[in-house]
Amino acid sequence: MAKTMDMTVGNPARLILTFCLPIAAGNLLQQFYNLVDTLVIGRGVGVVALAAVSGAGWLDWTVLSIAMGLAQGFAIQIAQSFGAGNHRELQRAVGQSILLAVATIFLLEIASQAALMPVLRLLAFPENTIHLTALYLRIIFGGLPLIMGFNLLSGFLQSVGDSRTPLIALVVATVVNILLDVTCVIVLRWDVAGAAIATTASQAVSFLICLRAVIHLPLLHPTAQDMRPDHHMIHRLLSLGIPVAFQNLIISIGGLVLQRVVNGFGFIFMAGYNAASRLQGMLELCGTAIGAGVGTFAGQNLGAGKLERVREGLRKSAVITVCVSLCITLCMFLFGRQLLALFVDDDPQIVDQVLTYGHRLLLVLSSALWGLYLLFVHRSTLQGLGDTFIPMLSGVVELVMRITCALLLPRLIGEWGVYFAEIAAWLGAAALLIWGYHHRMHILERAQTPPSAS
């Protein structure tokens, strides 16, 4: 049965780690089944199919991140209501979030399917991969309601302190995905379509598990009145959700521009770059998990009026994430090429080129991983404090840095310019978010301090 966690009392570091460990495990499993897709396609079908599926990553994220960003923003309100002990407001927020989610999915489904081929042409996908990429994405986009449903419900659960149920959902979904990947791609020979079907089916499983948990947690049950449009709450939820979704969208636009530059180097470079990008998700998972933990921690403690605990939680989270990132960096320098070799099986000469390109990207990315981890904890803390504007601006900084470097640096230093575009985006956004956090805390502390008597 789902359980809540009150993060307004107790040791901040212990609470955040206790909360985020299931999320980290869940992220690991989510990335693992993404890697299973890559491994099965790369070794079971070939480099062309690998380039097609892995090249879909940024466009896939562009659409999915809108749904995920809105769900994340809605969860901020629920965490704050839970921290304040206002369960009536919490249930109203749940009801209005469901209404907004349904409308979002309807619009996204139509837009994504209609725009798919024109966008792939615009991004200059090679002719030997473009139709495979389109097939893969049409199936993935067909599963948007399941993706939105899972992110919405897992956000509800995490906002009230339950990070265990989403983990269970991802464990089961990962097992289902692996079994279906092998069955659909290797046994039935459905190739790219089989990988997409396996992923979509596993998302259905994770959604149903979270739905069952929410059904058994009365705190998250909206009444019939809560399901009627409430313009005040809708405005509040959208004011939190739209900046997060827009932040994800503009980051994605930068990624799409970068993907077009990558495509220009040919499908072998595409395969190496995009295979390493899939592995990049594994590098990020600890940072995103701790970010989710400190974001919920900040939201609950803001609701309880305990700003000093927010500062303490952020400080300890930053130290933990930097230490973890440095350990991961060392592992990538020692074993990165061997990890990439697991995902590619083709002509030995082609494989060697793919691994060379992919390993170079891993080395560059891992060298600045500490900056990405600081970005995660400061962005999530700001969002938990109700500030989604500065995180949105950080997305603009990422967009500008990524596009500028991707378009200019390759002319000066060739393929290395593509690699450095990513870390330039991370470090520029991190600098803004660190300033934004301190500025936000200063404003909140001044508002909380009573004026001195004259």
Image (cartoon, helix red, strand yellow):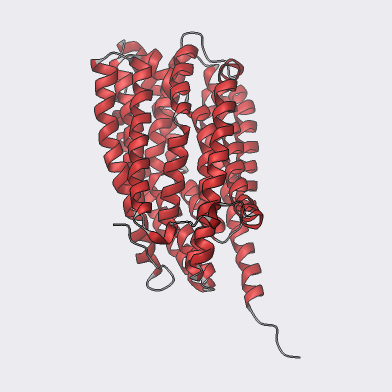
Please give the count of numbered marks on the rendered protein: 0
Q: Is residue 151 left or right of residue 194?
A: right
**Residue 98 versus residue 127: which sits nearer the camera?**
98
Residue 46 image offset from top left, x and y in percent: 34, 14
State the residue lying farthest toward the front.
224
Q: Residue at the spot x=48%, y=66% of the render?
A: 87
369 above or below 335? Answer: below
State the residue lying farthest toward the right.
454
Q: Is residue 308 left or right of residue 278?
A: right
**Residue 165 versus residue 435: which sits nearer the camera?**
165
Residue 425 image offset from top left, x and y in percent: 57, 40
Residue 98 image offset from top left, x and y in percent: 51, 47
Residue 397 image offset from top left, x and y in percent: 64, 43
Q: Would you say residue 245 is visible in this rendering?
A: yes
326 above or below 205? Answer: below
347 above or below 407? Answer: above
- Location of the C terminus by quadrant is bottom right
Residue 398 quadrant = top right
**Residue 293 versus residue 329: which sits nearer the camera?**
293
State the residue lying farthest toward the bottom.
454
Residue 352 quadrant = top left
Q: Is residue 26 left or right of residue 447?
A: left
Q: Would you say residue 380 is visible in this rendering?
A: no
Q: Residue at the spot x=42%, y=29% of the render?
A: 360
- Location of the N terminus by quadrant is bottom left
